[in-house]
Image (cartoon, rainbow, N blue to C red):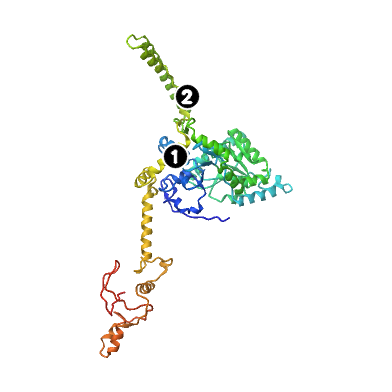
Amino acid sequence: DKLRIQWYTAWQNKAENSLYSMGDITALIPAEDVDIMILEEPEHLNWYRAPGESWTAKFKHVVGIVHTNYFVYASDQPAAFIRAPGMRLLCSWMCRAHCHRLIKLSGTLGRFAPEKELVENVHGVRYSFLETGKEVRKRLKALGGAKSDPIFGAEAQPTVYFIGKMLWSKGLLSLMELVKYAEDSAGIRIHIDMYGGGPDKDAAEERAKSLDVDMDFLGPIDHGELGFTHKIFINPSTSEVLTTTTAEALAMGKFVVVPSHPSNDFFAQFTNCLTYTNKEEFVGDLYYALTHSPEPLSEQEAFTLSWEAATKRLEAAGSIPVREAELMAEALRSNEAGIEISLPPLFENQEDREKIANGLKRSRNRFRQFRSRLSQEIMQSNVLPNLVKQRLASELEKRLDLDIERILESPKLELQLSPAELDKRLLDLYKAITEGPGGDLLRVIGGGNDVAFQTLYIKRNEAKKRKQSAIGRRSIVFGPFDAIEKDENAKTASQWVKRALRRNLPGKSIQISDSSSEDGQGVSNHQREENKSKLKMSLRPVAELSQTKMIRSTTGNRFCPPRSSSGKFTLLI
């Protein structure tokens, strides 16, 4: 099988430091290639997407793979209370409207469309990392290797490292505090090589010095170059969906020390993965890794980390068995369950939540007491008819059972609508607001900046194609600005002049004579007759030109003004 790569135009949104496609990319795929579509980051692809045919309408089956937790990023931005839930709803909208099946790389991601999503790691590592793992396995299985190997042996000097982008969100401070705790509580002082660049690198280096933690910040490096230099990889990050560097370290046969977190659930199955839930467990994992050799990477573990295995997992996760399709169809049609969309906590701090919950409970109790007294007074009234009194009393006795603590901690938006109907309405809404000039306006309001002008971009491209098509049809070419050739920038000025003469003048050869010779006294009548078919050029004689002849015309066109037929022309260059 051949892998065909087709590029599409994309612009950068500098405010978000992200790339977004320009124009209708569904139109780039010919009808004969339409079958199954896999969308990497379907939410990102469709935020500012141009109007065009929907993915689910054009393709038989659309699989979306969600990589990034945009909700976490939005939570760290200004106005997070508004942006974060808005981002979660927007991502859920894009995934529901444009995918038949949704694959989440780990359980860290929220719920987008529960009836069509599942969790599966469909990523692998490149072959060179697995080759390093095989070499390490040979070294460890060699005589005495597990004990005496200078890097991976149980008695080897500690070699510990971290690799990743230098951001506080990657757990840099957590790593420093854990290493400091290991030294203070167990007397384990280690040196850590920190690889990677990023905006927080200098601040992290200063913080490490202030905490007296032995760290060297060495800048970016290819992870593969560390295959035989370090034994232990520590990655404290919990902001990732799935950490690629952890998979690469395991593939190279290293110890990996990571927190027990949904983003690391896939890696917990490997022998050399050491997980911790608190500082004490981290110290225990670190001590074990320092005093032991990693287990040689087995063939099964190596295969699990390969792209071949990842592709098989993608095939299994992306397909829908018949029985599941039947159950899904029932769920999609059912109105009973409805849809639940999880929202971020209204208050992050638990003490704040408890304080507000207690206040709301007291207010509800007072209101209930008021309703109870009012109900008693209504029933004792001698003015109202009995039927009215009973109806009012029954209404006042109704209770709304709410778990206030749960609502504050994990609020949910519940829709009494079948998933299928919700998907359809969301897609219709998406089409309605993204088409036409109004769609560009909404994309600008949504923060699209330059990438928001999708409709304008399409119109300009269509106008450009019409112009190029018109240039290609006409027979008169005026110079480099009209040329459509691959080597147009390489032509010299004289080459452009010759090219213009060859293309603008008809094909039969004629002679070119010096205009000054015609004014001489010794010109015969026969010569004058011949001169009628000669092209006269002022200023000076020129060499004979090929493929030119006398032009006789009394009409003009949209490029040239009308001119009379004549046997003499003056060509000004």
Residue 201 in view: yes
Picture residue at 67% right of the left edge, 40% below the top: 291
Type of amino acid under label 2: Asp
Position in image of residue 152 (x %, y %): 66, 46
Position in image of residue 412 (x %, y %): 46, 31
Residue 88 in view: no
| Residue furthest to the right | 143
Q: Nearer the viewer, mark 1 or mark 2?
A: 1
Q: Which residue is mark 1?
A: 424
| Label 1: how many Cα within 10 Å (few below 14, some 14–19, many 20+) | some
Q: CA distance from mark 1 to mark 2?
A: 32 Å
Q: Relative to 238, does residue 141 appear above or below in the rendering? A: below
The first of marks 1 and 2 along the sequence is: 2
Q: Which mark is residue 211?
A: none
Picture residue at 38% right of the left edge, 43% below the top: 432
Q: Which residue is mark 2?
A: 403
Q: Relative to 516, does residue 554 appear above or below in the rendering? A: above
Left or right of 551, for residue 38: right
Type of amino acid under label 1: Lys
Return the residue nearer the eye: 478 or 202: 478
